Amino acid sequence: MREIMGAHSTNTASGAFSVTSPTVYAFKKEKMIGSAKNAIISGYFSDMLKNYVMQGGKVRYVDFLVAPMIAFKGLNVILA
């Protein structure tokens, strides 16, 4: 995903989150194999960090934030 909406509703005590994204991407063996529109992504930040897969070389700049592309496995994704 490139964007999320609803991050303000994250439970900071437990690390639980549920956000929406206008576009999500699926990867297999470091290659993008598909995308989908309007998805809900949920899980726990601690689990997400444990399931880190890889970091891409591309960097994205959004206002004051500079971040590389990062891949995780095992997130709950519901296509709307």
Image (cartoon, rainbow, N blue to C red):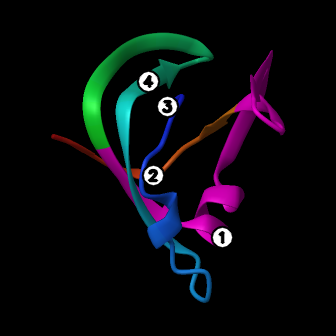
Earlier-in-chain disc, 3 versus 4: 3
Q: Which residue is mark 1?
A: 46
Q: In the image, which residues are magenta? A: 40-69
- Is 42 located above or below residue 30 in the figure? below
In the picture, measured across the screen, residue 10 lies left or right of residue 59, that is left
Could you tell me which secondary element the residue under label 4 belongs to? strand
* Disc nearer the start of the sequence (2/3): 3
Q: Name the secondary structure under disc 2.
A: loop
User: Mark 2 belongs to which amino acid?
Assistant: Leu
Of mark 1 and mark 4, the one earlier in the sequence is: 4
* Rendered location of residue 19, percent (x, y): 40, 55
Q: x, y (%) of residue 42? A: 40, 60
- The front one of 55 and 20 is 20
Q: Which residue is mark 2?
A: 75
Q: Quadrant of residue 23?
A: top left
Disc 3 or 1, which lies upstream in sequence? 3
Are the two marked residues, 3 and 4, in contact with CB atoms closer than 8 angstroms?
A: yes
Task: Determine crowd level at label 2: few under 14, some 14-19, many 20+ residues with C-alpha closer than 10 A.
Answer: some
CB contact under 8 Å: marks 1 and 4: no
Instruction: Look at label 3 and name its amino acid.
Output: Met
User: What x and y, as percent, mark residue 55?
Assistant: 78, 29
